[in-house]
C-alpha cells in the first residue's frame, strides 16, 4: 500500500477506493452547505482517479454523497459510471431496520426495499414492493406516515442524539455494500 498526501499517489494502481473524507456535516447544517467545499475535494480526487486501475470501484461516503459521486464521475470519465457509487446503502439499512422494528422479522425476511433520490430529506423510500416473508405490508398508513418520514429523517435524528455524525451507521453501510458488490446479495 502506498502512503502519501496527494490523491494521485494514493490512487496509483488501486482497484477499490472508499472516499470517506469530505467536509463533515455538523448539527444544523444542510447538505447544500457542504457542496462548495466538497466540490473542490471531489474535483481533485476525480482527476487523480486517472492513476487507478481502469476498473477501479469507488464508494463515496462524504455528504451530499450522490452529488459528490456525480462530481467524482464527471472528473473521472475513464471510470465506468456503475463503478462509482454512494451511500444509499445506509438509507437502505435504516429502512430495513424500521421494518424489522415494526414486524419483528429478520432482515433476511424483507425484500423490495428501494431508496429513490439523494441521501437527504428529499429521498423517498419506495413502498410498493416491500414484502416480509413474501407477503406485502398491508399497513399503508404506517408506511406513508411513519416509515417514509422516519427513514428520511433518521440521519438528523442520529445527529441530534449523538451530537455528531452517524459514523457507525455509515461504516455498516459501507461493509454491507462492499460485501454485496463483491459477493452478490
Image: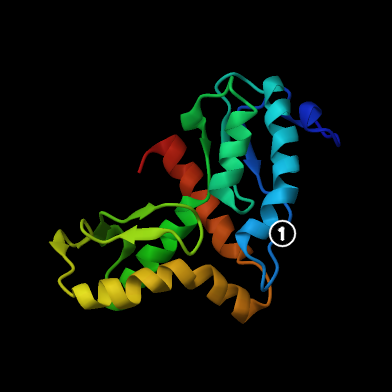
Residue that appears at 71% across and 21% down: 51
> Mark 1 = which residue?
24
Instruction: State the quadrant of the N terminus.
Output: top right
Colouring scheme applied when the structure was drawn? rainbow
Residue 139, relative to residue 128: is it above or below? Answer: below
Left or right of 55: which side holds 104? left
Instruction: State the quadrant of the C terminus.
Output: top left
Where residue 103 appears, x then y in whole percent? 26, 75
Closer to the camera, 126 or 4?
Answer: 126
Q: Say which element carries label 1.
A: loop
Where residue 166 appears, x then y in whole percent? 60, 66
Within the image, what quadrant is residue 135 found in? bottom left
Residue 74, relative to residue 140: is it above or below? Answer: above
Within the image, what quadrant is residue 144 found in? bottom left
Residue that appears at 43% across and 65% down: 94
Residue that appears at 62% across and 64% down: 30
Where residue 149 appears, x then y in whole percent? 39, 72
Amino acid at each position: 500500500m502506498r502512503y502519501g498526501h496527494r490523491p494521485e499517489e494514493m490512487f496509483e494502481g488501486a482497484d477499490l477506493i472508499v472516499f470517506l473524507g469530505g467536509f463533515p456535516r455538523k448539527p444544523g447544517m444542510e447538505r447544500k452547505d457542504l457542496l462548495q467545499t466538497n466540490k473542490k475535494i471531489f474535483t481533485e480526487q476525480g482527476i487523480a482517479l486517472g492513476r487507478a486501475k481502469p476498473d477501479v470501484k469507488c464508494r463515496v461516503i462524504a455528504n451530499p454523497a450522490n452529488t459528490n459521486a456525480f462530481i467524482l464521475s464527471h472528473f473521472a470519465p475513464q471510470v465506468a459510471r456503475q463503478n462509482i457509487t454512494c451511500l444509499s446503502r445506509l438509507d437502505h439499512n435504516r429502512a430495513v431496520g424500521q421494518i424489522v422494528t415494526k414486524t419483528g422479522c429478520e432482515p433476511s425476511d424483507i425484500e423490495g426495499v428501494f431508496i429513490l433520490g439523494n441521501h437527504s430529506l428529499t429521498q423517498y423510500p419506495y413502498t410498493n414492493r416491500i414484502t416480509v416473508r413474501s407477503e406485502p405490508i398491508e399497513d399503508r398508513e404506517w408506511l406513508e406516515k411513519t416509515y417514509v418520514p422516519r427513514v428520511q429523517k433518521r440521519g438528523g435524528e442520529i445527529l441530534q442524539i449523538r451530537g455528531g455524525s452517524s459514523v457507525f451507521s455509515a461504516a455498516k453501510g459501507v461493509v454491507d455494500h462492499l460485501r454485496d458488490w463483491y459477493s452478490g446479495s
